[in-house]
Amino acid sequence: MGKTSGLKPGSITPASGQYEEIGPRGGKGPEVTSVQGKPLPPTQKPGSTYTLVDPTKNESGKGK
């Protein structure tokens, strides 16, 4: 699995699961579900990033 924190919106999701939006000053925002290999959605505020907080626990989210 690749890097799972500090991910910018639009970057490819390294692992399926729940990602929490982290603001530019460290504040926590909403969680989004993203699938491995798909781009992360836009954040609510400029400069925010995503951090993986709850990886998918089944085999469907893993690459082949």
Image (cartoon, rainbow, N blue to C red):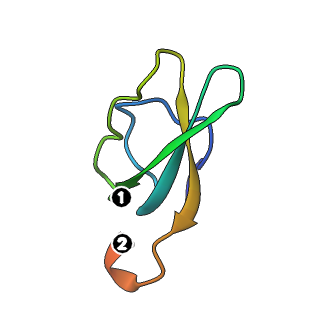
Q: Residue furthest right?
A: 26
Where disc 1 sits, the SS reads: loop
Task: Of the two numbered discs 2 and 1 on the same chain, state the one appearing first in sequence.
Answer: 1
Q: Residue at x 49, y 51 (%)?
A: 19
- Residue 13, disc: none
Residue projecting furthest to the bottom: 58
Viewer-proximal residue, 58 or 21? 21
Measured in 3D between alpha carbons, the distance from the residue under mark 2 to the one under mark 1, in whole angstroms, is 6 Å
Question: Relative to residue 1, is residue 2 depicted above or below?
Answer: above
The structure residue drawn at horizontal position 41% and vertical position 26%, both measured from the top left corner, is 44
Q: Residue at x 44, y 63 (%)?
A: 17
20 lies above or below 24: below
Give the class, few, some or many, for how many residues have Cα within 10 Å of label 2's Cα (few <14, many ≥20).
some
Q: Are marks 2 and 1 in contact (CB under 8 Å)?
A: yes
Figure label count: 2
Q: Quadrant of the C terminus?
A: bottom left
The 10 Å Cα crowd at callout 1, few under 14, some 14 to 19, many 20 or more, is some
Q: What kind of element bears circle 2? A: helix
Where does label 2 land, which residue? Answer: 61
Q: Is residue 52 left or right of residue 16?
A: right
Q: Which residue is mark 1?
A: 36
Question: What residue is at 34 percent from the left and 29 percent from the top?
Answer: 42
Q: Position of residue 31 (x, y in %)?
A: 47, 50
Residue 14 coordinates in the image, percent (x, y): 46, 53
| Residue type at numbered disc 1 | Gln
Q: Position of residue 45 (x, y in %)?
A: 46, 20
